[in-house]
């Protein structure tokens, strides 16, 4: 299923929301990732062809825009492609300018833990934009260092389960599990809540077994989990 395209009456809102997602992903990343996302925002704002959903620009022109040399441009574009933020549509060969497309799926995945920090209206819109992702099969996600989020007290059953998840995979815990809150446990059902519907569905689709295994020692008789938003 395709993500929403940048056409129609809601196109303006979708563009601004995507730029905001790029920005908050960068702001919550490492200093190097912050710089990369600032450069990407400048590129997208100035040169992105929203109708074709791509950007084509030469290295010399991009070097002038970013105030760097062409070698830095090559390294930066390579990093963005390896991080799956940009998808290369065609290489720049024999005088032909390379073409790139924003990878909405990766941008949404990286920024999702911080949508609620922008505001409830942004969170609601992004949940709508990302709705097609909820039916997607699992795919490899490249994680970045986000700022630590609040964790439940380790003296509680869910707090101990979170601590177990953090110990097994600190980055995965920081990016996806730390924001999950305990809501209740009844008749074998562990009820949790997430800051957004996207995070809730993503964890259920990709990491439900990991969460259930970590919680099983703390909740005897656990058979399944439910994550609401």
Image: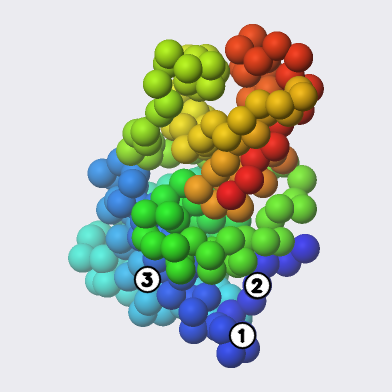
| 121 sits to left or right of 3 | left
Observer able to see residue 163: no
Q: Nearer the viewer, residue 214 or 75?
A: 214
Q: Nearer the viewer, residue 229 or 125?
A: 229
Residue depicted at 43% across the width and 26% down the height:
152
Q: Residues within 10 Å of mark 2 (few under 14, many from 20)?
A: some
| Count of marks placed on residues | 3
Looking at the picture, how far across and down is residue 191, in whole percent? 65, 34
Looking at the picture, how far across and down is residue 70, in whole percent? 31, 60
Looking at the picture, how far across and down is residue 15, in whole percent? 48, 76
Kindly indicate the quadrant of the structure image that contains residue 60.
Answer: bottom left
Q: Nearer the viewer, mark 1 or mark 3?
A: 1
Q: Residues within 10 Å of mark 3 (few under 14, many from 20)?
A: some
Of labels 2 and 3, earlier in sequence is 2
In this picture, is 10 found above or below 89? below
Observer able to see residue 126: yes
Q: CA distance from mark 2 to mark 3?
A: 21 Å
| 151 sits to left or right of 64 | right
Farthest-out residue, left: 67
Residue under numbered circle 3: 43
Residue under numbered circle 1: 7
Q: Nearer the viewer, residue 37 or 221?
A: 221
Numbered circle sitting on residue 4: 2
Residue depicted at 76% across the width and 14% down the height:
221
Q: Quadrant of the N terminus?
A: bottom right
């Amino acid at each position: 299923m395709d993500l929403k395209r940048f056409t129609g009456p809601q196109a303006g809102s979708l563009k601004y929301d995507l730029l905001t997602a790029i920005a908050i992903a960068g702001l919550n990343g490492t200093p190097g990732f912050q710089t990369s996302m600032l450069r990407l925002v400048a590129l997208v704002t100035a040169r992105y062809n929203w109708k074709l959903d791509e950007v084509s620009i030469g290295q010399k022109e991009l070097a002038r825009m970013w105030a760097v040399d062409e070698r830095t441009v090559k390294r930066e574009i390579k990093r963005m492609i390896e991080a799956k933020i940009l998808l290369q549509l065609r290489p720049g060969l024999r005088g032909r300018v390379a073409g790139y497309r924003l990878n909405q799926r990766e941008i949404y995945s990286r920024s999702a833990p911080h949508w609620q920090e922008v505001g409830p209206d942004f969170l609601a819109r992004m949940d709508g934009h990302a709705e097609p992702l909820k039916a997607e099969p699992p795919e490899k996600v490249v994680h970045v260092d986000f700022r630590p989020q609040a964790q439940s007290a380790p003296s509680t059953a869910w707090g101990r389960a979170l601590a177990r998840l953090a110990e097994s995979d600190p980055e995965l815990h920081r990016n996806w599990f730390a924001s999950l809150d305990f809501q209740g446990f009844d008749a074998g059902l562990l009820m949790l809540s997430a800051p957004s519907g996207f995070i809730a569905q993503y964890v259920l689709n990709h990491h439900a077994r990991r969460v259930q295994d970590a919680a099983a020692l703390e909740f005897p008789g656990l058979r399944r989990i439910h994550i609401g938003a």
